[in-house]
Amino acid sequence: MIASVSPEDRLRQAFDAYNRQDADALLVMMSADVRWATDRKPLHGKYELRRYWDRQWQRIRTHDQVVRIERISDVMYAVVLEQIVCSLNGTTLSTGRFVYRFVVKFGLIEALLSITATTA
């Protein structure tokens, strides 16, 4: 059933769940050995990813609005998004446009390979 969702729809669902801060819904969309690029060190596996999101959501609120999704190869996708980062009290801390590069196979997100700031 998971594989019946298109990779583009899976990525949109993931960003929707992220914006709701719904780690359980997010992790269902990930492979068991998911790899995740961060600004500090790469993460591996659902446990590390949940801990990362839990810590992040205790400090900030991020909203990612998908602008478009581009298919790069059979399994690789680039998601262009607008991001707003706010403090817990709602003060805007930063805004930007980014490209996230994902690997999606058999309906599951296997990896976030990179995050790059962009103006496109």
Image (cartoon, rainbow, N blue to C red):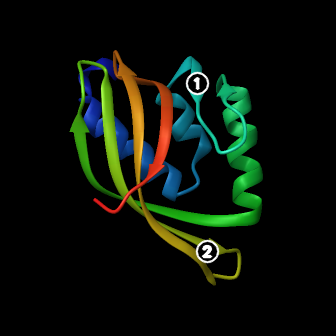
- Quadrant assignment for the N terminus: top left
Query: Could you say whether the residue bearing mark 2 is in a helix, strand or loop?
Result: strand
Give coordinates of residue 22: x percent, y percent.
Answer: 57, 49
| Depth check, front residue: 69 or 47 | 69
Q: Secondary structure at mark 1?
A: strand
Residue 105 visible, this angle = yes
Q: Is residue 77 above or below residue 116?
A: above
> Is residue 62 rendered to the left or right of residue 102?
right
The residue beneath circle 2 is 86
Mark closer to the chain start, 1 or 2: 1
Under mark 1, the amino acid is Arg
In the image, taking residue 55 as reference, residue 84 lies left or right, namely left
Would you place residue 116 above or below residue 108 in this image? below
Q: Which residue is mark 1?
A: 35
Q: Which is nearer the eye, 94 or 47?
A: 94
Residue 17 at x, y = what percent?
Answer: 48, 49
Residue pictured at 67% horizontal, 30% vertical: 42
Residue at position x 57%, y 22% from top? 34
Q: How many numbered marks, from 0 up?
A: 2
Q: Is residue 19 above or below residue 101?
A: below
Q: Residue at x 32, y 25 (%)?
A: 76
